[in-house]
Amino acid sequence: MSSSSRIAGVTRLRRILAWTVVAVASVLVVAFLGDMVAASRAESRLAHALSASPTLTYEPEVMLTGFPFWPRAGEGDFPLAHVSARGVSAPGCADRGACTVDVDARLSDAVLGDVWTIGPDSPIRYQRLEAQTRVDSVNLGRLMNIVDLYINTPAPEGKIGGGGPGDGLLERTEGIMLSGTVPLPGSPPREGRYPPSASGYPHPKVKVSVSARVSVHDGRVRIEATDFYTGPEEHFDDEVPDEFRSHVLKLFSATLPALPMAWGTPVTSALSRGSDLVLVGGSAAGTVTPRGY
């Protein structure tokens, strides 16, 4: 065989190998995209079934983990099913506007059955349920009747500007900072439609920050202001006469109404996370239905 023939043979072999690699890669990409589309459709199907729950206003977000998806679709056996529902109505705000919370659930080792036929009353089995309800500052202020209330998880002591993931202190049950405007003794809770934080409110008031702790009693969250905040975080410190300090602290203390949790999971603990108040609960193995969310 001549040298030119050998070179031509090698060139053809390289081309065949290259085209084979391209073909295999294309098949894998198509298979991956198809798997992703199928997973997205199944998540949408479950979200639609969950929307039958009378407590939900909007269709929730759903994420099913486990790759590849197709082999799991028939039995619906997934390592984790995550549901997040926004804007869930909460009680306790009276005439202060509608209160809403975000209700999340994580189902470990979830068995949904055939995901293509799942409906509002289909059973969902799980080995572990972790439920969380998040209350942001606006809605917490409505619940506590402090319209401009803001909740903050302070940085570690001695670390101004800290408190990020590197510090490992994103959550706290005490030393939580609450800020807002409240009336002094003798001032009404409102002046017509004006709360104390409004410029049209003419009575004595103060805008302060306090340190608080949270706990759970009989399934309800108790917020207790322990002192005025004097730490390094940006805060408010209007002068409060000594005889009024106890009164002002009590205005930052409250027992919240029973707030919605995924599938009625009992609240076992509460904490601050950034600018949210978070209620936490969980249960061992059990069965639920989408309608019961």
Image: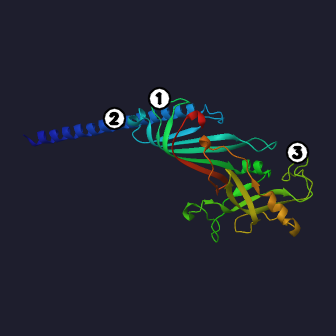
Work out whether residue 235 can be spotted. no
Disc 1 residue crowd, few under 14, some 14–19, many 20+, Cα 10 Å: some
- Pointer 3 or 1: first along the chain: 1
Q: In the displayed orientation, state which residue is furthest to the left.
A: 1
> Closer to us: mark 3 or mark 1?
1
* Viewer-closest of 21 and 82: 82
Label 1 SS: loop
Numbered circle sitting on residue 193: 3
Q: Quadrant of residue 274?
A: bottom right
Q: In the displayed orientation, state which residue is furthest to the front.
A: 218
Quadrant for the C terminus, please. top right
Residue drawn at (77%, 57%) of the image: 253
Indicate the amino acid at tag 2: Val
For this view, does 192 lie left or right of residue 166?
right
Quadrant for the N terminus, please. top left
Tell me, what colour scheme is on the image?
rainbow
Indicate the amino acid at tag 1: Trp
- Give the residue number, with chain letter if any, for mark 2: 27
Label 3 SS: loop
Numbered circle sitting on residue 116: 1
Estimate the spatial distance between the alpha carbons at disc 2 and disc 1, rounded to whole Å: 25 Å
Work out whether residue 5 can be spotted. yes
Indicate the amino acid at tag 3: Arg
Residue drawn at (74%, 53%) of the image: 255
* Viewer-closest of 264 and 134: 264
